[in-house]
């Protein structure tokens, strides 16, 4: 076990980063053909919010540049998964909503990744996963609160 606080911090972040990378690889492999992890993330977010968002709001939510989000949204719009409309009060702004086809694509993707994540939860045990969730959530909230440049 790490003796010094910095050793503990390094061990924690090494494990988090590696787990994140491996989870992304495993989930990406089972997503429906043509769907990228970023596409699923946006569709999942829009489905859960059940409301329109601006591209800028989505970029901030996913901690990506507006250009990167514009690229993702263009691909999703081309696939028919999102609707992008102008703001009727300010033509410089747009609103994004999930389409019925996007909701269906998100549901299919969710069905494909659930077994992968479910296997990990089953192997670790639901009790251990429930125990670690508050710690991970608090870490996320601290990083969101202390975000550089905000």
Image: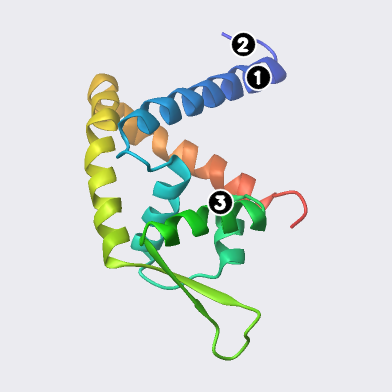
User: Would you place residue 13 above or below residue 71 in this image?
Assistant: above
Q: How crowded is mark 2: few (under 14 residues within 10 Å), some or many (20 or more)?
A: few
Its colouring scheme is rainbow
Task: Find out whether the residues at labels 2 and 3 contact each other: C-beta distance under 8 Å.
Answer: no
Q: Nearer the viewer, residue 36 or 1?
A: 36
Q: Is residue 140 left or right of residue 52?
A: right
Mark drawn on residue 141: none
| Residue at point 43%, 41% (across, down) | 36
**Residue 16 percent coordinates (x, y):** 53, 26
| Residue at point 28%, 44% (across, down) | 109
Outermost residue, bottom side? 89
* Displayed quadrant of residue 133: top left
Q: Of helix, strand and loop, which one carries label 1?
A: helix
Q: Is residue 132 left or right of residue 2?
A: left
Give the mark nearer the N terminus: 1 vs 3: 1
* Displayed quadrant of residue 114: top left
C-alpha span from label 1 to label 2 = 9 Å
C-alpha span from label 2 to label 3 = 32 Å
**Residue 90 percent coordinates (x, y):** 63, 87
C-alpha span from label 1 to label 3 = 24 Å
Q: Which one is closest to the eye, mark 1 or mark 3?
A: 3
* Displayed quadrant of residue 24: top left
Q: Which one is closest to the eye, mark 1 or mark 2?
A: 1
Give the mark nearer the N terminus: 2 vs 3: 2
Q: Mark 1 points at which residue?
A: 10
Q: Is residue 137 left or right of residue 65?
A: left
Q: Name the residue under label 3.
A: 62
Q: Name the residue under label 2.
A: 2
- The mark total stands at 3
User: Would you place residue 1 above or below residue 32 in this image?
Assistant: above
């Amino acid at each position: 076990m790490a003796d010094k606080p910095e050793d503990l911090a390094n061990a924690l972040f090494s494990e988090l980063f590696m787990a994140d990378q491996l989870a992304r690889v495993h989930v990406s492999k089972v997503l429906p053909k043509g769907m990228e992890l970023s596409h699923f993330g946006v569709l999942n977010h829009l489905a859960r919010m059940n409301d329109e968002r601006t591209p800028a709001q989505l970029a901030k939510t996913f901690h990506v540049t507006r250009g990167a989000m514009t690229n993702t949204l263009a691909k999703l719009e081309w696939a028919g998964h999102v609707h992008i409309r102008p703001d009727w009060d300010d033509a410089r702004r747009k609103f994004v909503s999930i389409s019925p086809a996007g909701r269906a694509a998100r549901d299919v993707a969710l069905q494909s990744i659930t077994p992968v994540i479910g296997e990990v939860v089953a192997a670790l045990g639901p009790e251990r996963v429930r125990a670690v969730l508050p710690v991970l959530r608090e870490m996320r909230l601290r990083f969101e609160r202390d975000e550089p440049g905000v």
